Amino acid sequence: MKLHISLSSFRYKLTFAFRALKMRNFRLFFYAGMVSLMGTWIQNLALGWLVYKLTDSAFYLGLVGFAGQIPALVLTPVAGVYSDRLNRRNVLMLTQFVPMVLAFVLSFLVFTDKVSITLVLIIVMFNGLALAFDTPFRHAFLMEMIGDKRLISNAVALNSTLVNTARFIGPTLGGLLIALFGEAVCFVINGISFMAMLWALFSMKVPVYQRNKPQRSVMADLVAGFSYTWNFKPARYMIMLVTVTSVFGLPFQAFLPVFARDILAGESQLLGFLTGAVGAGALTGAMYLATREGVQKIPAIIRFSALLFAVGLFVFSLSSNQMLSVIVLFFSGFGMITQFSATNTLLQTVVDENIRGRVLSFYSMSFMGFTPIGSLLLGTMADYFGVSNTFTIASLVLLFAALLFSARMKTIRSTLSLPSH
């Protein structure tokens, strides 16, 4: 009897955790996204390994990260304005097609032994241009895709789940593929994987596109979106915390090849395990959020996850043991993705539809646009102080930012009319 009750309870929790998948459009997006993102993470790992093999320089790892994401700093807010004006699905199909072509071009260059760090930087820059438009349009399209605001928080969490399932499995496969076949095969696989998302977007049934003719200029809409985001204190504090995390925390992933080869004395397989550990922790964090209902405790979740990420990165920066590093990166990944996904969930829930694209574009800019600045900054510091010392310093900055956010908790709760406990 008890076993039957336990199984029934487990089935209910499992169904509840995946409740947004009952919507056909989101099912298409979820499963196609799993394939596409798997290819993306395989390519990300192969690209980092290729760049470090070409240059033997931590600075160039940071520079490639900078080149791939700096377009977001300039273009993402503008993309947010257009995501409130244009057909979101059509733009998303374009932002999938461009990276697909670039992946095939990169594989051709490696296969023919014509690749150079200059060509890699150019390809990564163009890929960043597509990504700068893809992210705000994708976030804004979520409500249009699902059509039920009650499912938004679960859809955001499940989106993080698929991203981090791919982050967990993709790098492990990537490390194995590099060892067996080389980097070029990884780029081919990524190019093919984009076809799944193109098919899913084409197959979705969404309401006939209708947008009111804009009454203001792009700049006026951009200023209005910034004013709303800045004056709405919960959004301001959350986005500022994400920005600091993006500058001093997220770039550590670009430097994992240095930790794997030079500090932990491993090869591409170890790099796959390290990246996979981040993904496993992130996946666990995303699943944790998927089982939650409501937004009452989200500010406290953001605070805890920010502190966990800071402490995890601090321990990782000092570790010279492979097993300890893998374990610590699991908890770091949990803290990192939980903070970001919880922030996204709260913003999606409380922001009005007519300004959704612009607010979410500032959220996207906070982690896409400022991460490359952090990559360049920390890459430069790493050449002078060493990679380990650089990320010890960075983790202390993250800890300070998390404590500042904690001091703003009362204001956030009162503004959102959330209970104190």
Image (cartoon, grey):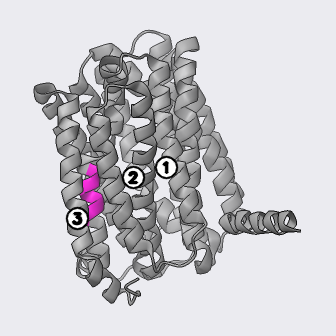
On the question of residue 294 being in view, the answer is yes
* Residue 282, disc: 1
Q: Residue at x 55, y 29 (%)?
A: 172
Compared to residue 198, the image places residue 241 above or below, namely below
Mark 2 Cα-neighbour bin, 10 Å: few <14, some 14–19, many ≥20: many
Of the image marks 3 and 2, the number of the one nearer the N terminus: 2
Of the image marks 3 and 1, the number of the one nearer the N terminus: 1
Q: Which three-letter amino acid code belongs to the residue tagged 2?
A: Met
Residue 295 place in picture, x, y as percent: 48, 78
Please state the extent of the stretch shown in magenta in the rendering: 240-246
Q: Quadrant of residue 6?
A: bottom right
Q: Which three-letter amino acid code belongs to the residue tagged 3?
A: Leu
Eye-nearest disc, 3 or 2: 3
Compared to residue 79, the image places residue 413 above or below, namely below
Mark 3: secondary structure: helix
Q: Which three-letter amino acid code belongs to the residue tagged 1?
A: Ala
Give the labeled residue for mark 2: 336
CA gap between label 1 and label 2 equals 7 Å
